[in-house]
């Protein structure tokens, strides 16, 4: 019998949060440290690189966090009248806001695999 268990390096979390793309927006279906799946009305091609920001407004109460990411598109599939995009996150930086004018930038990792 074949083992059909997924072989992922990091755990996937089912969560719906806004994704801001260079040319539009979307909503996540699930996210992990090394990947993302989101639904959008934008068209993408497998193999392309994309940049996006994930909003985590309630990750830390009172301190909204935004992840600026760069990813490699692995798969694109129809999802009703929109497109589902699976991508491997290659690099990220997170911005955490402390008060109205105080933002902390923390570099991410370019070795997420």
Image: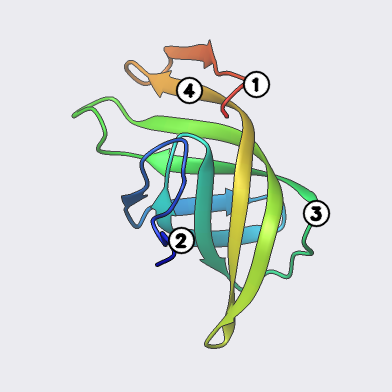
Give whichever of 55, 111 is nearer the camera. Answer: 111
Would you name the residue on which mark 1 appears? 110
How far across and down, in percent of the image, does residue 39 sit?
52, 67
The first of marks 3 and 2 along the sequence is 2
C-beta proximity under 8 Å, tags 2 and 1? no
Vertical side of 11 occupied by 93: above or below: above
Q: In screen coordinates, is 101 left or right of 62?
A: right
Disc 1 versus disc 4: nearer the observer? 1
C-alpha separation, residue under disc 3 versus residue under disc 2: 21 Å
User: Does residue 97 lie above or below 76 as drawn?
Assistant: above
Q: In terms of depth relative to the viewer, which is nearer, 99 or 31?
A: 31
Q: Which residue is mark 4?
A: 95
Q: Which residue is mark 2?
A: 27
Q: Residues within 10 Å of mark 2 (few under 14, many from 20)?
A: some
Q: As displayed, is residue 98 above or below residue 17?
A: above
| Mark closest to the chain's N terminus, 2 or 4 | 2
Q: Could you tell me how far apart the alpha carbons at marks 2 and 4 are, in whole angstroms? A: 19 Å
**Pointer 3 with pointer 1, Cβ within 8 A:** no
Residue at image position (55%, 18%) is 108
Quarter containing the C terminus: top right
Residue at 33% from the left image edge and 15% from the top image edge: 98
Residue with the mark numbered 3: 47
- Residue 107, by quadrant, is top right
Task: Say which quadrant the N terminus sits in.
Answer: bottom left
Instruction: Say which label, 2 or 1, has the lower sequence index.
Output: 2
Secondary structure of the residue carrying tag 4 is strand
Please provide percent x and percent y for residue 63.
28, 25
In the rendered view, does 70 fall on the left or right side of 92? right
- Mark 2 lies on a secondary structure that is strand
Which residue is depicted at the point 36% across and 41% down? 11
Residue 43 location, x and y as percent?
A: 73, 70
Q: Mark 3 or 1 closer to N-term?
A: 3
């Amino acid at each position: 019998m074949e083992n059909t268990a997924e072989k992922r390096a990091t755990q996937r979390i089912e969560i719906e949060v806004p994704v801001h793309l260079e040319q539009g927006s979307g909503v996540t279906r699930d996210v992990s440290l090394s990947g993302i799946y989101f639904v959008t009305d934008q068209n993408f091609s497998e193999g392309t690189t994309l940049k996006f920001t994930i909003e985590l407004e309630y990750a830390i109460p009172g301190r909204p966090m935004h992840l600026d990411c760069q990813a490699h598109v692995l798969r694109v599939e129809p999802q009703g009248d929109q497109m589902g995009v699976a991508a491997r996150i290659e690099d990220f930086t997170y911005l955490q806001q402390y008060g109205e004018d105080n933002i902390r930038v923390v570099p991410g990792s370019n070795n997420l695999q």
